Image (cartoon, helix red, strand yellow):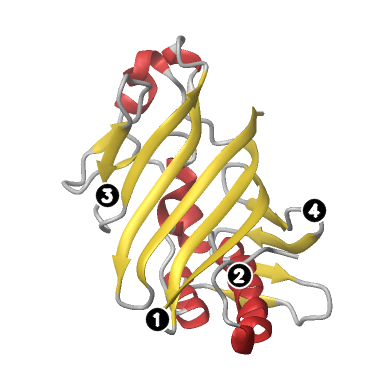
Amino acid sequence: MMRRSRNTAGTASRAGRAALTALAIAVSVSGCSSFLPSNNRSTADAVSGSARQYHQLIDVSGRLSVRYEQDGKEQAIHGNFTWSQNNQDTVVTLLSPLGQTLATINIGVDKATLAQAGQPLRSAGDVDSLTVQTLGWPLPIAGLRDWLQGFGSNAAGQRFVATPATDTYDVTTADNWRLQYANWQNQENAAESYPKRIDLARNTKQAGDVAIRIVIDSRQPR
């Protein structure tokens, strides 16, 4: 099962179940309209960063941790994930730290579905509304298809290509998430570099200061 921190004895069972469900659904709904193929990517995506290429077809696996506030107390949940995308569809599998499958998610052009053992199949067409209604706090799911590969749009709506540097690559997005690319693979070769660790932070009405850390352990373009 997933680990949690700073829970009181009186709320441990309830909050534990809520945290597990929250993380599973959070990853599961990271699709729908957010995962439509991006046909208007800037040419800079292909030529900036010493020609590092964006891959529409890619498999990624890694670890995910989330910190947030619930009932005035800090909560923390941890898990692993796999991510497989093509031009139109994405499949995400959420795993516990011990490798147990918690959810299998299929994300299409206009709908995302979530399967969990012993639970009815969930589906949604509006990913942002479903996230807020289910979790009570926002996740930056709309940008993950780009951000996992170091691409995106900044607060001014300009496309960016994150690159390895002496200091952490730091950018704020149009929806006020602060992204910090803190670690890279193949840092010496910009054309072959890709993010190893991405830290995300935002102050929210629903859950105070939310912090998400994504560690990418492997990536396989197809």
Query: Can you say whether 118 is above or below 10 in the image?
Result: above
Contact (CB < 8 A) between labels 2 and 3? Answer: no
Q: Which residue is mark 4?
A: 98
- The residue drawn where x is 47% and y is 49% is 144
Could you tell me the amino acid type at mark 4? Leu
Among the two numbered marks 1 and 2 on one chain, the one whose residue lies closer to the N terminus: 2
Q: Position of residue 168 (x, y in %)?
A: 33, 30
Query: Can you say whether 140 is above or below 19 in the image?
Result: above
**Residue 220: quarter of image:** top right
Q: Nearer the viewer, mark 3 or mark 4?
A: 4
Could you tell me the amino acid type at mark 1? Gly
Neighbour class for label 3 at 10 Å: few (<14), some, many (≥20)?
A: some
Query: Can you say whether 15 is above or below 169 in the image?
Result: below
Identify the secondary structure beneath mark 4: loop
Q: Which residue is mark 3?
A: 173
Q: Nearer the viewer, mark 1 or mark 3?
A: 1
Q: In 3D space, how far apart are the residues under numbered discs 4 and 2 (Cα atoms)?
A: 19 Å
**In the orientation shown, which residue stands out farthest toward the left?**
156
Q: In 3D space, how far apart are the residues under numbered discs 4 and 1 (Cα atoms)?
A: 29 Å
Identify the secondary structure beneath mark 1: loop
